[in-house]
Image: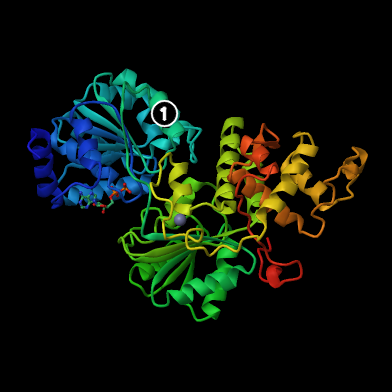
């Protein structure tokens, strides 16, 4: 702690924020800023990214430029900074001419320490000229994954940020995000034209969270069970549609749970009230679309249930991550159904102005990631951190349904897996999962008969099983590396591991599912 940067930064932290220590990687991230090096900083939600550029901005001469996509969050941050005694302002479409003039004066006379700007405003010629003539100390880009079409929230207006390097060639540019895989991190650096950036990536594991995945069939009962287990505590239930939010909230209230709905279709003041009631524990369970949670910082959320499938693992990490911010145990349950996957697929593929072929492909890949996670039978903590390019470093997390041996597994998985894999082989590795499952189920669809696949030895080999179960097993075999999906159509191929399985080597794990006539369809996701 002797180096002068650290000393200066510690003093700023203490004096303006009253903090006596750095969070993990904050010191490194701040040092990169002060050294004027470009950087890409990935820290989980709540990790303290804002301070990584705010504290250096205060410690350095000149004014920091902060690019942020969300007007509401911009105002929050500026208000907080002013409360701490740091001169800060924002430029966006909500300002009056008078207010804007005041901000511009502040930029010109050098009295501002931080200036927040939305990307589209920044790229106006007037703004760029203003900045080129101001004493800008650093540029911070918040939610930086928005620049990458590989990411889960691509925003075309972010692409123009590549111009920053031309307009301000001598200052460090710093990208911050909570959710970037290695490919996205590299892409951020490339798109922004960063020079030899420092990559700082925090740990994504949340050891105090217990992750579980269950089939969505009998959804309401499962949610109620979790809510009962946490009676008197706070929880969030996420649904995909507003209708589902209303239905689920009403059903929970009917069961005596203090629940309330929250979605963008409700009036502003109703939403604000619900949010306050939740923060003050008058409402225990919020049933919401993903609109809820942005900027909410309730430390003692004890459970997050996804009653509908999230559209990416990044989104899942962020939404489930709202549980247990206080570091105490909390649980995250994902209720999975193939129907939800189909719903998302339809939404993603439906035409809209912002979608490009590459962003649609990325969204479908992200969706597949969630299916893989849900169908996976390996440690959930490991699966999540691996998605973000990290390793867990232990085989048994002790905090997921897999490691806690809660999964209901097939007794003779090897034989079952061999049947499926040999069908892929018999089909000469030329078909996708749907078709392969139909052949295994002995479907009399015309296509199958016409190609003579009803004469394969593997035809109807699993005719006693539900097609949806077979489909699930295929996904599990893919997730465990026995099969891979190739090309645009997801044609199934055997991996070396899959070949070995045919010779009886390997330990696949496959989930048993409810019997055909069981109550599995009761209360199931009827969309
Ligand atoms: P992120 O943007 O990474 O989600 P924030 O920057 O909003 O996280 O920080 C989350 C919370 O942690 C904020 O309330 C912030 O004031 C607090 N915080 C950040 N750094 C520190 C620190 N070094 N010591 C104590 N609290 C901190
Ligand atoms: Zn585990």
| Residue placed most toward the observer, 266 or 263 | 263
Residue 33 falls in which quadrant of the image?
A: top left
Q: How many marks?
A: 1
Q: What residue is shown at x 69% (from left), y 68% (from top)?
A: 520
Relative to 357, 471 lies left or right? right
Local crowd size for mark 1, using a 10 Å CA cut-off: few (<14), some (14–19), many (≥20): some
Question: Looking at the image, is 525 positioned above or below residue 443?
Answer: below
Relative to 42, 88 lies left or right? left
Question: Looking at the image, is 374 positioned above or below residue 58?
Answer: below
Rendered location of residue 137, percent (x, y): 20, 28
Q: Secondary structure at mark 1?
A: helix
Q: What residue is shown at x 31% (from left), y 60% (from top)?
A: 327
Q: What residue is shown at x 58% (from left), y 39% (from top)?
A: 365
Residue 161 falls in which quadrant of the image?
A: top left
Instruction: Let me know if residue 272 appears in the view.
Output: no
Rendered location of residue 8, percent (x, y): 9, 38
Rendered location of residue 287, percent (x, y): 49, 66
Circle 1 sits on which residue?
186
Residue 34 falls in which quadrant of the image?
A: top left
Rendered location of residue 506, percent (x, y): 61, 46
Q: Quadrant of the N terminus?
A: top left
Instruction: Let me know if residue 178 appears in the view.
Output: yes
| Residue placed most toward the observer, 429 or 500 | 500
The chosen color scheme is: rainbow
Question: Looking at the image, is 336 positioned above or below residue 153?
Answer: below
Q: What residue is shown at x 60% (from left), y 52% (from top)?
A: 375
Q: Quadrant of the C terminus?
A: bottom right
Relative to 440, 310 lies left or right? left
| Residue placed most toward the observer, 213 or 29 | 213
Badge 1 residue CB within 8 Å of ligand 1: no
Relative to 89, 467 lies left or right? right
């Amino acid at each position: 702690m002797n180096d002068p940067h650290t000393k200066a930064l510690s003093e700023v932290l203490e004096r303006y924020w009253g903090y006596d220590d750095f969070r993990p990687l904050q010191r490194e991230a701040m040092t990169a800023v002060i050294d004027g090096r470009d950087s890409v900083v990935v820290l989980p939600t709540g990790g303290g990214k804002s301070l990584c550029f705010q504290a250096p901005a205060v410690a350095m001469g000149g004014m920091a430029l902060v690019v942020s996509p969300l007007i509401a969050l911009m105002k929050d941050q500026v208000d907080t900074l002013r409360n701490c005694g740091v001169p800060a302002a924002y430029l966006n479409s909500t300002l009056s001419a008078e207010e804007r003039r005041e901000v511009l004066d502040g930029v010109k006379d050098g009295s501002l320490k931080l200036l927040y700007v939305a990307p589209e405003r920044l790229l106006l010629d007037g703004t760029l000229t203003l900045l080129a003539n101001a004493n800008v100390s650093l540029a911070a880009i918040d939610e930086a994954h928005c620049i990458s079409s590989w990411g889960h929230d691509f925003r075309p207006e972010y692409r123009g940020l590549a111009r920053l390097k031309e307009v301000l060639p001598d200052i460090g540019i710093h990208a911050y995000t909570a959710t970037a895989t290695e490919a996205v991190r590299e892409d951020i650096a490339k798109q922004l034209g960063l020079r030899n950036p420092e990559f700082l990536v925090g740990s994504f594991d949340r050891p105090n969270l217990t992750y579980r995945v269950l089939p969505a069939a009998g959804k309401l009962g499962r949610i109620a069970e979790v809510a009962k287990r946490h009676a008197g505590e706070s929880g969030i239930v996420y649904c995909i549609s507003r209708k589902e939010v209303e239905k689920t909230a009403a059903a929970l209230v009917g069961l005596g749970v203090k629940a309330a709905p929250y979605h963008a279709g409700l009036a502003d003041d109703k939403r604000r009230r619900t949010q306050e009631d939740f923060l003050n524990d008058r409402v225990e369970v919020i049933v919401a679309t993903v609109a809820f949670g942005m900027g909410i910082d309730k430390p003692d959320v004890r459970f997050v249930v996804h009653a509908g499938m999230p559209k990416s693992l990044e989104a899942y990490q962020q939404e489930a991550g709202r549980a247990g911010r206080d570091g105490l145990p909390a649980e995250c349950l994902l209720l999975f159904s193939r129907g939800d996957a189909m719903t998302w697929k339809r939404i993603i593929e439906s035409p809209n102005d912002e979608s490009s072929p590459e962003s649609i492909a990325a969204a479908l890949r992200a969706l597949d990631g969630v299916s893989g996670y849900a169908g996976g039978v390996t440690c959930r903590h490991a699966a999540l951190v691996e998605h973000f390019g990290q390793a867990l470093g232990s085989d048994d997390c002790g905090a997921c349904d897999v490691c806690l041996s809660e999964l209901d597994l097939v007794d003779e998985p090897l034989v079952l897996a061999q049947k499926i894999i040999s069908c892929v082989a018999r089909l000469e590795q030329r078909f996708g999962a749907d078709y392969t499952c139909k052949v295994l189920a002995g479907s009399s669809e015309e296509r199958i008969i016409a190609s003579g696949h009803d004469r394969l030895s593997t035809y109807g080999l699993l005719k006693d099983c539900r097609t949806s179960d077979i489909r699930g097993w295929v996904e599990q075999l893919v997730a465990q590396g026995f099969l891979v999906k190739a090309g645009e159509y997801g044609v199934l191929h055997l991996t070396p591991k899959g070949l070995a399985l045919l010779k009886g080597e390997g330990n696949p794990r496959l989930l048993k599912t409810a019997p055909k006539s069981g109550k599995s369809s009761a209360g199931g996701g009827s969309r």
